Amino acid sequence: MARIFSGIQPTGIAHLGNYLGAIRNWVALQNGNEGIYCLVDLHALTVWVDPEALRAQTRTNAALLIACGIDPARSILFNQSAVHAHARLAWIFNCVARFGWLNRMTQFKDKAGKDREAVSTGLFVYPNLMAADILAYHATEVPVGDDQSQHLELANDIAQKFNHDYGVEFFPTITPRIMKASARIMSLRDGQKKMSKSDPSDQSRINLTDSADVIAQKIRRAKTDPEPLPGSEEGLAQRPEAQNLVGIYAALADQTVAEVLRRHEGKGFGPFKESLTELVESVIRPIAEATQRIEQDAGEIDRILRNGADRAAAIADPIVTEAEKIVGFLQP
Ligand code: AMP
Ligand code: TRP
C-alpha cells in the first residue's frame, strides 16, 4: 500500500484536462492505496483571486472531486490552508531550494510572462510549497498531468538536499505517476496550448459542469483542419488539433489512438465530432449532475473537508515537527 498525494487549484472549475490527466487516476489509485487529495488554496493565492470566489470554488471543486468518484470515507479530501503543516514545511523548503533552481521553472516563466517584476513572490516559490505538500506526508506516489513533472523533479532535489545538508535519511523519493496517453489535453481553440482554467476563453475547455448543449457547441466550434481522419498515427503528425480530439476520444473510450483511427478512418471532422460529443456527454453528464446535488449542501461539504483536514493533520503534524527538530528549532 502506497501513500498517494495530489492537489488541484480551486481556481475556476475543473475541466476535461484535469479529469483525464489527473482526477481519473486519483480515483483509480484509491483502491489498495492511501489517497490524500488536496484543494490547494494556498497555491491559488499566488495570482489574484477574489476571496468570495475562492471560498465558493473551493466548495464546488470539492463537490466535483466527490462526484468524480473520490470517496471521502476512504480517501482524505481537504483544503490546504486548513492544515498548517504545509506552510510550516514550505518555509523550511524556501530556505533549502536554490534561487537558480526556481528560476528555471517553465511554469513560472509562462505564468510570469514579460512582467516578472510585477508577479507575487508566492508565484516564484510555488514549487517549494508543492514539495512541502507531498513531503509533509512522506507520500511517495504523485499522480499528475505532464505539466507538473518539472515541479516533481524539483521536489526530489529539495528532499535530497535537505537529507544531505542535515545528514539524515528523512524525506523519501517521490515517484511521479503520469498517465502518458492523457497527460496533456490541449485547448480546443489552439492545439499548441494546454487546456487550462486560466485561459480567458471558456470555449477553449470543457468544464466538468458544462451542460449537454454547451459541450455540443464547444466541440462543434473546436478548431480542426480540413483533412479527413487518417488511418494511422503518422497521419496525425503536424496536426495538433486533430491529434488532440482523437486523443480525447481514445482516453474517454479507453481505446488506443490506433484503434480510434481504424474505426473512423476517412471520416470528416463533422461526423467525428458528433461521436466525440456523445462520448464526452456520457462521461460528464453524471459528474455534472452529482456535483449539482452535492453542492446544494454546503454544510456537508464543509464537514467533509473539516474531517479530511483533521485526518491529514494527524499524519503531517508529527512529520513536520520532526523536520523542525532536525533543522534546530527549539521546541520548548
Ligand atoms: P491545476 O488545474 O493546474 O490545479 O491542475 C490539477 C491537475 O490537473 C494537475 O495534476 C495537472 O497536471 C493536471 N492538468 C491540468 N491541466 C491539464 C491538461 N490540459 N491535460 C492534462 N492534465 C492537466
Ligand atoms: N501545482 C499543481 C497544479 O497546478 C497542484 C499541486 C499543488 C499539486 N500541490 C501539489 C499536485 C502536490 C501534486 C502534488 O497542477
Image: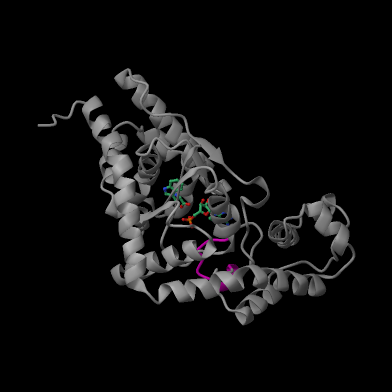
The residue that appears at 49% across and 37% down in the rendered structure is 2
Q: Is residue 46 visible?
A: no
Image quadrant where one finds the C terminus: top left
Q: How many marks?
A: 0
Left or right: 14 in relation to 190: left
> Which color scheme did the rendering employ for the protein?
one colour
The residue that appears at 63% across and 75% down in the rendered structure is 215
Residue 62, percent from left and from top: 42, 63
248 w.r.t. 150: above or below: below
Q: Main secondary structure of the magenta part?
A: loop
Residue 206, percent from left and from top: 59, 69
165 w.r.t. 98: above or below: above
- Farthest residue to the left: give it: 332
211 w.r.t. 283: above or below: below
Residue 201, percent from left and from top: 54, 71
Towards the viewer: 117 or 249: 249
Please say whether residue 108 is one of the residues in the magenta stretch: no
155 w.r.t. 116: above or below: above
The residue that appears at 73% across and 60% down in the rendered structure is 253
The residue that appears at 64% across and 66% down in the rendered structure is 188
- Farthest residue to the top: give it: 167
Please say whether residue 204 is one of the residues in the magenta stretch: yes
Towards the viewer: 11 or 301: 301
Residue 129, percent from left and from top: 35, 44
Q: Which contiguous range is marked in magenta?
A: 195-205
The quadrant in which residue 219 appears is: bottom right
Q: Is residue 312 visible?
A: yes
